[in-house]
Image (spheres, rainbow, N blue to C red):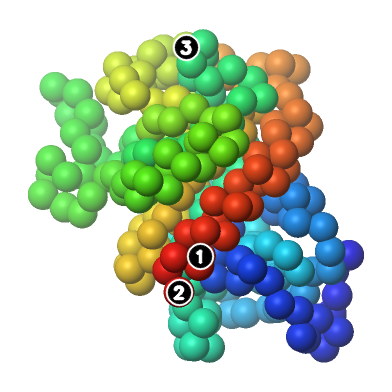
Amino acid sequence: MVLPPEEGRGLTTSLTRVLVATAVPAERDAVAEAFPGPVRERTLPGAVVHRTADGPDLIAAGVGPALAAASTAAALTAAALDGRPYALVVCAGIGGGFVPDAPLGSLVVADAITAADLGAETAEGFLPVTELGFGTVTHHPPASLAAAAAAASGARTGTVLTVSTVTGTAARADTLRARHPRALAEGMEGFGVAEAAAAQGVPVLEIRAVSNPVGPRDRAAWRIGDALAALTDGFGKLAPVLESWNQHDQ
């Protein structure tokens, strides 16, 4: 149940300083299901924040790294100006898994969030933007937090790639795995969310529920419902870990 702003006043939560950024409302709502109770909606310039009664704040940040970064930055800035800055940002959602290491329905927690296609194609192959002398291509969540989140949720831990184009061929999947041998999953928002968090000095975590294999595009083989259910279940198990981090950073 979503309450209008005036009816939601007075809600208190144990995770009010944790922001969860998903791509689309279906993912946001799957996370919210792990925290039953009323939800207060707040509209900001650039983002709509859903504040759960017993859990974190949630935003459907949009598809792709650019929009996800912009929406996350808007929510982070608003919280900081309100005098209640977030202690942690979690990018969450469904995504592709590199089989057999990340099978359908499994959870992946990132220990590295990497922009897989940010760079330049050359005659010698792909060059990441860092080798061109600019920026970064990887953000690392706090190691202890990633390990605790994986242990609590039963997730696998590895690199989660951020792509601007979803992989649709076996050749592309093989290229990504050759370039990033620790990759377990791909999504489209993690690096953008991480960039926004890093700009404001906020740690980040990424969690993906695997809905489809990375490779040839076969919509009939996707298990979106199962992945959303896994996301709900995973966040239910993650709540104590997030609460501990939230309290530790007070």
Tell me the residue at 84%/64% (across/down). Answer: 37
* Left or right placement of residue 128 versus residue 222 in this view: left
Image quadrant where one finds the N terminus:
bottom right
The answer to whether mark 1 and mark 3 are in CB contact below 8 A is no
The x and y percentages for residue 164 are 45, 41
Secondary structure under the numbered disc 2 in the rendered image:
loop
Dot 3 crowding, Cα within 10 Å, few <14, some 14–19, many 20+ = few
The x and y percentages for residue 4 are 84, 80
Examine the rendering and report whether any part of residue 187 can be seen.
Answer: no
> What mark, if any, has residue 250 been given in the picture?
2
The x and y percentages for residue 131 are 12, 40
Secondary structure under the numbered disc 1 in the rendered image:
helix
Front one among 113 and 118: 113
User: What amino acid type should be assigned to the residue bearing mark 1?
Assistant: Asn
Front one among 24 and 52: 52
**What is the CA distance from the residue labelled 2 to the residue labelled 3?**
46 Å
Examine the rendering and report whether any part of residue 172 can be seen.
Answer: yes
**What is the CA distance from the residue labelled 1 to the residue labelled 3?**
41 Å
> What mark, if any, has residue 226 been given in the picture?
none
Mark earlier in primary sequence (1, 3): 3
Vertical relation: 239 (above or below) 168: below
Dot 2 crowding, Cα within 10 Å, few <14, some 14–19, many 20+ = few
To which residue does mark 3 refer?
Answer: 170
User: What amino acid type should be assigned to the residue bearing mark 3?
Assistant: Ala
Dot 1 crowding, Cα within 10 Å, few <14, some 14–19, many 20+ = some
The answer to whether mark 2 and mark 1 are in CB contact below 8 A is yes
To which residue does mark 1 refer?
Answer: 246
Tell me the residue at 27%/45% (across/down). Answer: 137
User: What amino acid type should be assigned to the residue bearing mark 2?
Assistant: Gln
Vertical relation: 122 (above or below) 24: above
* Left or right placement of residue 34 versus residue 112 in this view: right
